[in-house]
Image (tube, helix red, strand yellow):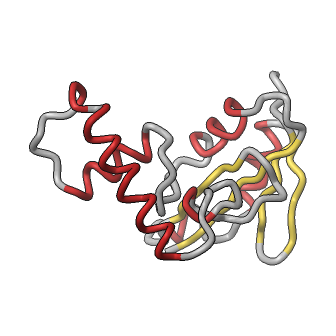
Amino acid sequence: MILTPSVTIPLEPKMKQIRCIEEFLQALDAVPFIGGHHSHVRVWFRGQPEARLALQPGVYRPQFPVTTEEERIELERHLAQDFRVEAAALLTGRETAAELYFIQQHYRLPTRLLDWTHNPLASCILPSTSQPSMARYSLWMHTK
């Protein structure tokens, strides 16, 4: 079995160390509202490359170069406009503003969005591939 970097899953208020996929799947099986009798519960997962980081969209992370909300909005507008110009060959011209925003997120522009998935294994892919040398990354689980 290939071992993955150590994953931290916030289950209730405590964290759980996971060292391989088998442990990860066992931890998921132990969560009472996943599958079985609770199939009506929607569970969302998000992986992050660094366990110490909070859940913050790109435009609210420390490296986003603004100090006020007005500056943040202005810079977002400039980035969106630049994206429309630079990505013109990739676009049909019929995209809505919301669709463009999601496309920008896909191309790693800082946005107010966070990627979540229903697939717990898919949530492990981004953090493990974006910085494979990291010893720890986190996996967040949310129910709706």
The front one of 32 and 87 is: 87
The x and y percentages for residue 21 are 76, 37
Seen as rendered, the residue at the extreme left is 94
Indicate the quadrant where residue 125 lies: top right
**Measuring 86% from the left and 72% from the top, which residue is drawn there?**
14
Image label count: 0
Q: Is residue 99 left or right of residue 19?
A: left
Q: Is residue 68 above or below residue 7?
A: below
| Image quadrant where one finds the N terminus | top right
The x and y percentages for residue 10 are 78, 65
The x and y percentages for residue 124 are 66, 41
The x and y percentages for residue 112 are 48, 63
The front one of 136 and 34 is: 136
Q: Is residue 142 left or right of residue 49?
A: left
**Measuring 45% from the left and 59% from the top, which residue is drawn there?**
75
**Measuring 43% from the left and 71% from the top, which residue is drawn there?**
40
Q: Is residue 64 above or below residue 5?
A: below
**Measuring 83% from the left and 36% from the top, which residue is drawn there?**
20
Seen as rendered, the residue at the extreme top is 1
The front one of 61 and 55 is: 61
